[in-house]
Image (tube, rainbow, N blue to C red):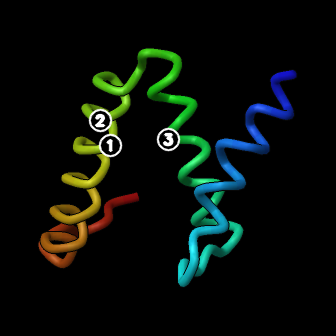
Amino acid sequence: MVEGTARHLVGDRLEITGARWGLAGAEAVLKLRAVISNGDLDRYWTYHLDREHQRVHQARHQEEYTLTA
C-alpha cells in the first residue's frame, strides 16, 4: 500500500508535462518530502542555513588563513 501511494504521488509530480527531472533532483525532492513528513523541517532548515553560511564565508575568506602544521 505504501509503495503504491508513493508511486502515485511521486510519479504524478515527476511526470508533469514539460518538466525535466534528473535522478539527483528527484532524490532531493524525495528527501525533502521525508524531512517534512517526519516533522524535522525547522531543524533541517537551521542546519541547511548554517552549512550554506559556512560554505559562502569560508570560501570568501580562505586566502586570509595560513596553515600551520
Residue 58: image quadrant is bottom left
Which residue bears the numbered disc 1? Answer: 48
Q: Is residue 42 left or right of residue 12?
A: left
Three-letter amino acid code at disc 3? Leu
Q: Position of residue 45 (x, y in %)?
A: 29, 35
Q: Is residue 3 left or right of residue 50?
A: right
In percent of the image, x 31 and y 65: which residue is there? Answer: 67
Crowding at dot 1, Cα within 10 Å, few <14 / some 14-19 / many 20+, comes out as: few
In percent of the image, x 81 and y 24: which residue is there? Answer: 2
CA gap, disc 3 to disc 2?
A: 10 Å
Taking 32 as reference, is 68 above or below it?
below
Asked whether 50 or 16 is in front, the reply is: 16
CA gap, disc 1 to disc 3?
A: 12 Å
In percent of the image, x 24 and y 41: which residue is there? Answer: 50
CA gap, disc 2 to disc 1?
A: 5 Å
Q: Which mark is residue 32?
A: 3
Label located before the other in sequence (3 or 2): 3
Which residue bears the numbered disc 2? Answer: 45
Task: Confirm or deny contact between disc 2 and disc 1 (CB under 8 A).
Answer: yes
Asked whether 14 or 55 is in front, the reply is: 14
Taking 6 as reference, is 56 above or below it?
below
Disc 2 is placed on an element classified as helix
Disc 1 is placed on an element classified as helix
Three-letter amino acid code at disc 2? Trp
Task: Confirm or deny contact between disc 3 and disc 2 (CB under 8 A).
Answer: no
